[in-house]
Each structure stands twice: as C-alpha cells, then as structure tokens.
Amino acid sequence: MSLTLYDTMARQKRPFVPADPRRVTMYVCGPTVYNYSHVGNFRPVVVFDVLFRLLRRLYGEGAVLYAANVTDVDDKINAKAAEEGVPIGTITDRYLAAYNADARALGALPPTAQPRATQTMDAIIAMIGRLVANTSAYAAQGHVLFDTQAYGDYGRLSGRPLDEMIAGARVEVAPYKQHPADFVLWKPSKPGEPAWDSPWGPGRPGWHIECSAMIEQELGLPIDIHGGGIDLVFPHHENELAQGVCAGEHGAYAHYWLHNGFLNMADEKMSKSVGNVTLAHDLLDRHPGEVIRWALLGAHYRQPLAWTEDALAQARNSLDHLYGVLGRARDISPGGSGGLLEDQLAPLLDDLNTPAAMAELKRLANELDAAVRKGARAAGPLKQDLLALAGVIGVLQADPQAWFQGGADEGLAATINGLIAARDAARGAKDWGEADRIRAELTGLNVEVMDGPAGATWRIREQA
C-alpha cells in the first residue's frame, strides 16, 4: 500500500509520488515570532511532524528535506520592538527560542532547515527583480507589486473566482495598484523601522514573497509538498504559487498542497485577534508534551478540532494506558517481527489518518498486554511493532516509570514507595481503615494510586 495524500489543488486524494525519491522535499509555513504561540499554531507543527516521520520511514532519514520558515520582520514584530525599545532581533530571537522549545516539548523533530526572512533578503530581492524583469511585477511609488493578471491560473488553488476572493479578504486599497488583487512584494519602511537596500529604495519585503524565496533557496523549485493551515490557502498560498511560478521557468511550484483544519475553542477558531487563545507555553506547565500532542492528533488533520479540557484528560488516560502496558512489558525484549508491518502503517498511509493509527496503537498495546500475562512468545514482536508505530506517531518516547513518576524527586519517590508498601501491607492484613488513611495521605501528596493485577502503581497528578 502506497502513501496517498489529499491535495488541495486537485481536491482529492492522490498517490504520493515524489519527483526524486532520493530527495523528497517538504515546506511548511512557520511562525511570526513576536510572542508565545498558541496551541492552535502547533497543530500544523505536530501534523507535519507525523508526515515528516512517515516520509523518513518510507524513503530513508537522509532522503527527506523539510524546511519550516520563520517570519522575523513584520509590523507586529516592529511594534513589539518599539514598545520595549530594543532591536527586532531581540524580540525574534527570544520568541523563536520559546517556539522551538515548545515544539521540542511536543515531540516535533527539528526540520532540516529553518530559514529566516532577514537572512534570506538577497534571495528575496533577486526574486522580485526577476518578476519585475519579466513584467509579472511593477514598481509604483516606492512599492513593488505583483501583477495578478500576469498569472492566468490565479485563484485555482483556492477554487474561487477572483472577485469572490477579493470580497472575502482584507485587500489593501491603494491608488498605485493596477488591479485590486495585486499584492505587495516590496514596500518602503516607516521611519525607525528596519530597512534593507534594494533597487526600488530602502524597505522590506511583503509576507508572501518571503516564503517563495526561502523555498527556492533552501529546497529548489518545484517542491514535492507544501503544507500549512487552511487559513493560508488564500491569500498567502495563492500568492506564493503565482509569484513562484512567474519568477522561474519551472511551470510548477508544489506538486501537493496539504492544509490542516482549525483548532476551535467553543466552536470558534482559536485566534489572537479574537482573544480566545491558549498558549502552548502555558499548557506545557500543566501537561506533558505527549498529552498535548495526542490531543492535537485526535481528529483527522483536515477536520476542525475542538480543544477542551476533556480532550486533554482523554489524551492523558490513553497514554497512561499505553505506558502502563509498556511498564508491565519492561522485561520483554522487542524484536522478531522484522519491523513495522505495512497493515499497521495503513491508517497513516491513507492521508495521515491519525485517529485510526492511534486506535491501531491501542490494539497492539492490548495484544501485548495479553501476551505478557500469558508469557506468549508473540510479546517481543508485538512490543517491537508497538514502539515502531508509536515512533512514527511521535509518542511513547519516555521511560514508563519516568512517565508516571517524573514529577517526584528521589526523596518524594522514596516516601511514596514507602507509603505504597505500607498500604499494601494494610490491605493484606485487611486493615481497610489504615489502607484508606494511607491512600488519603498519598492524595495529600498529589499522588494518584492505580491498583492493578500486578500491584499498585502511582503517578504525580497534573497541576490544575
């Protein structure tokens, strides 16, 4: 079974065939770094990390090149820097470091490349120059604008007529535009703002041209896969596609376009402008990164995902079960199956169906648990397949004991284990009153006791 992906351009699932299986290329739009990112911003990070892991398994780790950009010059960045009285680099370095730390905590592998707009300025200016030279762009009043009439397929990606797209988007009205849909490639900087020299005067690039130039510089055009949130289809990706094709001689920009759905709070898209955001930075103070990752993968990536405390609680319960199985299978050596079987990868091969893949993970865990209890020889192969599938999904990366007890230092762990032993002794003597008293003492230490056939285990409760 081969990998199929839903291509936004084709509006259907297509078998994935890279242009060169020895060099598979993927680009995903990354953050604008002026503040901490909300958890909705990390849905594409986690989704495309699963795809990155899957591609590496299919084609080899060294064969997959994954670039995720950083927008580090922007009106909001400028405003934040002016507010604090510091250079924009102080702001962007701070919040890029926080973003990358949060991504690591969510189990995301580092991309192959993380280009920054400010470090790609020569390539941006060169691409704009080519667009001006071939009359796909024009200079006007210190600006350079892309001529949307120069690209006959403009609007094909979003699948909407141009007039409808303009009506549904915030289009800047300016007297120097030849057409209302034309968009800025270069603009003059305001006094006090960062500026770069260019043939059209000092200024800075528009948002869309940054990605096209970074893709061309880091990966080369055309690329295999371009990903991002569904809100980027228009205008960002539509504009990227138009200028990227017109700037080169490739006739193509990306062979597959993938877009993830929104993360919703109370039936409304999570958005800083709406003010209904939950910062991943704050969530990670209360929940392990794998819990948040599991919750983010709980719906198919193309569907909206409702973000609730209940979703996080269910994610924790699911992972507790899986880690509990691994803990009981700690003495089993994985091996014997020859690697992950294709039918176990089948849900992910079918357009990254993570809910079905997670159900398969639970099925493998239950079979492993039964095999361990019976002492069956199948336990080793089952454990290997469980860990292999978990590795592609990006979970079960911790030691089971650390998963449950990682919030306790050595002294607290010794106290807890002593109380657990005393409680077991009380239960063995049928002194239920003493057993209940000890359990209450453990509860007071923020410890949850989990009784099972193999005896009691425990974990530190998450912070409320």
Image (cartoon, rainbow, N blue to C red):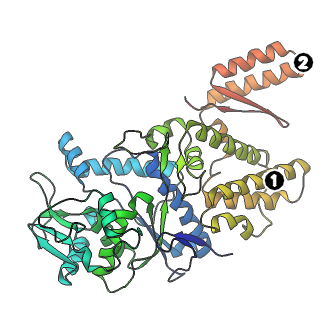
Task: Left or right? Give the position of 194 relative to 7.
Answer: left
Q: Position of residue 17 (x, y in %)?
A: 56, 80
Name the amino acid type tagged 1.
Answer: Leu
Image mark for residue 368:
1
Query: For the view shown, which residue lies furthest in the bottom direction?
Result: 249
Instruction: Please tell me how crowded label 1 is: few (under 14), some (14-19), or many (20+) other residues with Cα within 10 Å.
Output: many
Task: Left or right? Give the position of 258 relative to 389.
Answer: left
Q: Residue 114: in sight, yes or no?
A: no
Q: Residue at x 39, y 45 (%)?
A: 271
- Please, what secondary structure does the residue beneath circle 1 have? helix
- Please, what secondary structure does the residue beneath circle 2 have? loop
Q: Earlier in the sequence, mark 2 or mark 1?
A: 1
Of badges 2 and 1, the one in the foreground is: 1
Q: Residue 414: in sight, yes or no?
A: yes
Q: Is residue 442 above or below residue 31?
A: above
Q: Position of residue 158 (x, y in %)?
A: 41, 67
- The image quadrant that residue 292 belongs to is top right
